[in-house]
Image: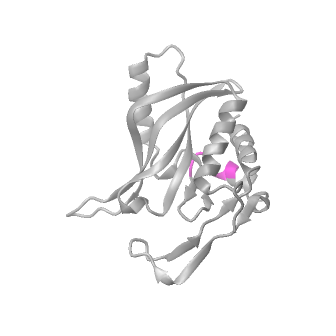
Amino acid sequence: MAEESELDVRDLLKKAYEELSQRNKNRQIDFPSQVTTLIADDSDWHRSRAGYLGYTSAREFQFDGKFWIIARGEKCGSYPADPYDSDILALEFSLEGRETKAVERELVKKIGESQYFSNSLVYGMADGNLAINERGRFGKQMIELLRPRINKFIAQEPEYDQEVLSLSTLRPICKKSVKYKPEFASFLAETFERVLK
């Protein structure tokens, strides 16, 4: 049985985001309504079915003179989003001297253009695994920094029921998701800082 202090992927990303915010001066931006970006699409000529990541707020950070908007999103929309859970998105962007409404409009546009995890530092899957878009802006650096160390932070590997398939994904159902050691959140926050400097 998993210890209470072990983290599922959503809690891991929440904690890493909170730690990044506590360690660095930042400014909060609350969106008037949820901002989304497309992560999966199963639409065809007669119907529309899409999955998204939704963001309700973001924060502005500065690392080595560069300004970044960082936000934590959670899956929303239709069944194509089912294999996913949440992410940490980063956009190079400064709020300096801009009006609030103009900033909101531009961020809605930039987040919307961040389809298929192209600006995600890392994202979580429904089975608890962490994933990185290798072709995304931060993919190569994140893989280089996480691959050699991630296994030491895994507290529980996923377990799948090979006899039952999900009708939406045609994959085995996850019986137990990946759990992470709590100290992984600090390591992730430090990794985000290294990549964004």
Colour mapping used in the image: one colour
Looking at this view, name the residue that lies furthest to the top: 97
Q: Nearer the viewer, residue 101 or 45?
A: 101
Looking at this view, name the residue that lies furthest to the left: 46
Relative to residue 53, is residue 176 drawn left or right?
right
The relative height of residue 104 versus residue 85 in the rendered view (above or below) is above
Relative to residue 44, is residue 28 drawn left or right?
right
Residue under the image location 56 percent in, 65 percent down: 127
Q: Nearer the viewer, residue 175 or 46?
A: 175
Q: Nearer the viewer, residue 177 or 92?
A: 177
The magenta stretch spans residue 139: yes
The relative height of residue 170 versus residue 65 in the rendered view (above or below) is below
Q: Which residues are magenta?
A: 136-142
x and y percent of residue 102 in the render?
A: 40, 21
Number of numbered discs visible in the structure rendering: 0
Residue under the image location 54 percent in, 83 percent down: 162
Q: Quadrant of residue 28?
A: top right
The relative height of residue 25 versus residue 154 in the rendered view (above or below) is above
The magenta stretch spans residue 117: no
x and y percent of residue 159 in the render?
A: 62, 75
Residue 138: tell me if it is visible. Answer: no
Residue 149: tell me if it is visible. Answer: yes
Q: Quadrant of the N terminus?
A: bottom right
Relative to residue 97, is residue 79 drawn left or right?
left
The relative height of residue 21 versus residue 151 in the rendered view (above or below) is above
x and y percent of residue 90 in the render?
A: 57, 39
Residue under the image location 72 percent in, 60 percent down: 3
Residue under the image location 71 percent in, 34 percent down: 197
